[in-house]
Amino acid sequence: MAKYVLQQYKGRLNSRVKISGCKNAALPIMCAATLSTETSTISDIPDLIDVNIMKDILVHLGANIQYDKASKTMTIGYGGNGSFEAPYDMVDKLRASVLSMGVLLATKGMAKVASPGGCPIGARPIDLHLKGFAAMGAEIQQGHGYVMAMASRGLHGATIYLDFPSVGATENIMLAAVTARGETIIDNAANEPEIVDLASFLSSMGADISGAGTDKIRIQGVNKLHAADHTIMPDRIETESFMAIAAILGGRLEIVNAIPEHVKPVTAKLREMGCVVTEEEGCIVVETPENVNLKSVDIKTLPHPGFPTDMQAPFTSLLCKTAGTGIITETVFENRFLHVQELKRMGANIKIDGRTAYIEGGLPLTGTKVKAMDLRAGMAMILAGLFADGQTEIDNIYHIERGYEDLPEKLRSMGVEIARID
């Protein structure tokens, strides 16, 4: 098992970092490309574990895929053969693999998918996905660790109300609906930027979609989709992670290939803490003046456009350094404080009461051996290791490398002393 060895950063930043393409946009768009037998070209797809797992799943299901890791370009088309079943040994590694259901129902009329895996941050049931498929005419069967959906007569449009604005369910229903008969309306839809990016790609393939980015999406089914070229949006969670890194290290960090509109909640909290955040087109600069001591804030995670749950763990580490007591309330996932025990091993004083964490800031942390308990918890360990005294060893970095491309290289370019050791 590989690990990161990280030394305490001493000094102040004066650096620049470029953000990669967004994993959470790339995965559904890869699925969408297989809705056409023609070959689409997708640019800025990050070279990540999750991307490669999704590629393997789609190839197993009949896709033709070529990925040039040097240029981050992928060509994708549906070959017409392959299985209608996404097996456990693939699906267990990637929760987003459930998105293959919408594509399989649209292209083959049936889908069998093992119950999905991914990070252990909460139950995240797929009942909303299945509710949408059932409304569109699919017959659902569950058992023995698998979910089967069948639409022998094809899918038809429906009005679907989501009890929670689930990103995955919104995407899956969109994938199934673009070639279904009639109109599909997704009410209380997720409105994350990744939804807009998916809709943009599908529209360029010939889909008829309106309302993406709002809580009501309308899709008029079309008979056939064609190939399209698309560039993946920048990764907003990576952007926000580097914004937090800039705050923790002090000095100035220029973050390029970033969309300021996508990171408003994090920008607001960093300004409240005392950081200076300036925005330009495609660029964000985070500065912490030398005479400023960052102060604690209170945070409540919410679906977009609220404060993102994916930044809760990194901000827990950041609040360990700030003056005062910070409070974080997690409303999205019920098991997303796995990083707290690891931070306590480094000397953090954090108390958990239900879904709320109370973080006493300003206490010194000491580097030690810790684990990345999930993807974003791994970034929390990186942030803590940057200011903890001495050396920090982070195991389980498989989770981190699922979502952050070339992280050691990017940190080293900023002056951070970090090594990846097999």
Image (spheres, rainbow, N blue to C red):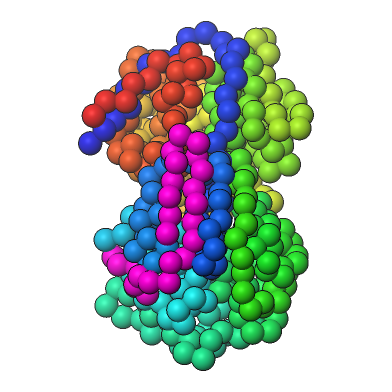
Residue 199 shows in the view:
no
Image height of 31 relative to 249, above or below: below
Q: Where is residue 305 in the image (x, y as percent from the top left)?
A: 69, 51
Q: Residue at x 54, y 18 (%)?
A: 249
Question: Residue 281, located in which quarter of the rendered image?
Answer: top right
| Residue at the far bottom in the pictured view | 153
Magenta segment: does it hold 73?
yes
Magenta segment: does it hold 154?
no
For the record, the magenta segment spans: 64-88
375 or 90: which is nearer to us? 90
Q: Is residue 240 left or right of residue 212?
A: left
| Residue at the far front in the pictured view | 38
**Looking at the rendering, in which quadrant would you find the N terminus?**
top left
291 or 46: which is nearer to us? 46
Image height of 353 relative to 112, above or below: above
Q: Position of residue 107 (x, y in %)?
A: 49, 76
69 or 335: which is nearer to us? 69
Q: Which residue is drawn at 52% across and 8% down?
A: 11
Q: Where is residue 83 in the image (x, y as percent from the top left)?
A: 34, 72
